Amino acid sequence: MREPMGAVEDGTLGGPARDGSGNTVRVAGIDCGTNSIRLLIADFDHAAGVMTDRLRRTTLVRLGQDVDRTGRLASEAIERTRVALADYVAACRAADVQRIRMVATSATRDAANRADFRAMVLATLGAEPEVVSGDVEAELSFTGAVRELAGRVPAPHLVSDLGGGSTELVLGDTADEPGVVAAYSMDIGSVRLTERHLHDDPPTADQVAAAEADIRTAVAQARSVVPVERAATFVGVSGTVTTVAALAQGLSAYDPDRIHHSRVPLDGVRAAAERMLRSTHAERAASPVIQPGRVDVIGAGALILRVLMEETGAADVVVSERDILDGLTWSVVGKG
């Protein structure tokens, strides 16, 4: 890389991006969550204020394997993440990335041995990751999700980022205040709920009911902080949400152009969730739109989305392919 990826005090790797001419700069964001680690390399044109994607990658590493039960990151999960991160670092070097920011979210926040993860990242990336709070995660998710939606759908926007270990609920862009107004990070996610409740294949009715009770309790707590009734549009982001959208649309292959900014009605989400929760692992694995690393947790993820929509009164969800990874990458140039 043209400049070292050294950490600065605020945890960003290199700080806001600037090149010598003040024109285009190549930046990257790495988002390490409970189920996946993702990379976005993009070019930012300072004069036009435009970000152009150059490379996106997603690797399902299940970093949060058993964290809900053990409170620790499994050594094999850290190793899977290391392999993926090393690949991303090589891609950034090959692309001549000038600034990069890496964040880690729910699983790393919760793990007693998160120092082991930090040490791995330091050795692989050359700098420690930024382990962000739920509030920061929510703000980055909101920024990524709604940047393209301004003027397209009514505000205020209620954004849900449905992850493997946590789910963020963020309200923003109200009439009297732009950006994030209120946010809450719920300790529920597709991996966490699957490991906690959905043990059979397919899960039993009692297991699904227990998972649903957990979700409703978490949403009730979120509603005490986030005034969801003020929202005009419910926006869903994350691999879980886009996968449910593909299932609801009956796609024969995953098509981001048909997913991005599509609207999925509550009945469509309900049908997809019921189908996922009643199917076996083999039946889910046969779906062409479900990634292998998501097969065992998509039922819990679809259930979370369904309950969120019911509890917030959303008639449909606007699905966005843009999320925390995009907000993270914008933040590298000081625009997040």
Image (tube, rainbow, N blue to C red):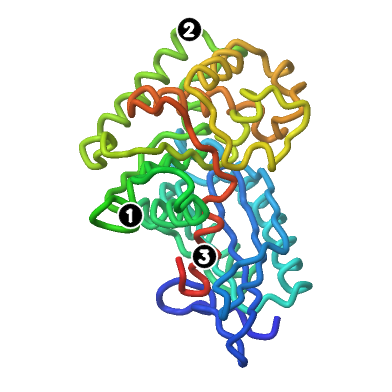
Q: Nearer the viewer, residue 265 or 165?
A: 265
Tell me which label, 2 or 3, sits earlier in the chain: 3
Q: Please, what secondary structure does the residue beneath circle 1 have?
A: strand
Labels 2 and 1 touching (C-beta < 8 A): no
| Left or right position of 30 against 267 | right
Q: Is residue 176 visible?
A: yes
- Give the amino acid at mark 3: Pro
Q: Residue furthest top?
A: 205
Q: Nearer the viewer, residue 246 or 291?
A: 246
- Label of residue 180 in the image: 1
Tell me which label, 1 or 3, sits earlier in the chain: 3
Q: Please, what secondary structure does the residue beneath circle 3 have?
A: loop
| Left or right position of 239 against 53 | left
Tell me which label, 2 or 1, sits earlier in the chain: 1
Q: Nearer the viewer, mark 2 or mark 1?
A: 1
Residue 79, how many percent across, how many down? 67, 52
Residue beneath disc 3? 129
Residue beneath disc 2? 205
Q: Nearer the viewer, mark 1 or mark 3?
A: 1
Name which residue lies at 42% across and 25% down.
315
Q: Is residue 222 visible?
A: no
Q: CA distance from mark 2 to mark 3?
A: 40 Å
- Classify mark 3: residues with Cα within 10 Å, few (<14), some (14-19) or many (20+): many
Name which residue lies at 38% across and 57% down.
136
